[in-house]
Image (spheres, helix red, strand yellow):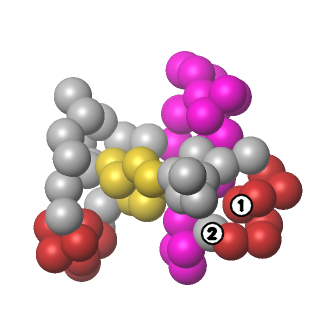
Amino acid sequence: MPTEIDRDEVQRLLEAGALFVDVLPPMEYREQHLRGALSIPLKQMNAETTTDLRRDQPVIVYCHDYQ
């Protein structure tokens, strides 16, 4: 279930081993992703593209779109 979190919680979760997922399109990911983020473009997110995500591990999903 998606939950909005603040910067401190992001840091805590990453330190505890959470996965960091950027949902930008590939070109934008290459230009501006945050270090350590996996690339799974939102339009391509499905059961096959998320097989590396574990159900027992928190996943932080983000997108920066300048809007």
Instruction: Indicate left or right for 3 with 14 as reference.
Output: left
Instruction: Indicate left or right for 55 with 44 as reference.
Output: left
Instruction: Indicate left or right for 32 with 65 as reference.
Output: right
Measured as percent of width and height from the top left, residue 14 is found at: 29, 71
Q: Relative to 40, say whether 13 is above or below.
A: below
Q: Main secondary structure of the magenta part?
A: loop
Magenta stretch bounds: 34-52
Instruction: Give the CA distance from mark 2 to mark 1.
Output: 5 Å
Residue at 39% x, 58% y: name it: 19
Q: Is residue 55 magenta?
A: no
Q: Relative to 57, say whether 50 is above or below.
A: above
Count residues near mark 1 (Cα–Cα under 10 Å), then give few for <14, some for 14-19, many for 20+. some
Mark number displayed over residue 33:
2
Q: Is residue 28 visible to the viewer in this orientation of the structure?
A: yes
Q: Is residue 43 magenta?
A: yes
Residue type at mark 2 is: His
Q: Quadrant of residue 33?
A: bottom right
Measured as percent of width and height from the top left, residue 60 is found at: 35, 53
Q: Quadrant of residue 15?
A: bottom left
Q: Answer whether labels 2 and 1 touch (C-beta < 8 Å).
A: yes
Measured as percent of width and height from the top left, residue 61 is found at: 42, 49
Question: Which type of secondary structure does the marked residue at label 2 adopt?
Answer: loop
Count residues near mark 2 (Cα–Cα under 10 Å), then give few for <14, some for 14-19, many for 20+. many
Residue at 78% x, 66% y: name it: 30
* Residue underneath mark 1: 29
Measured as percent of width and height from the top left, residue 7 is found at: 23, 72
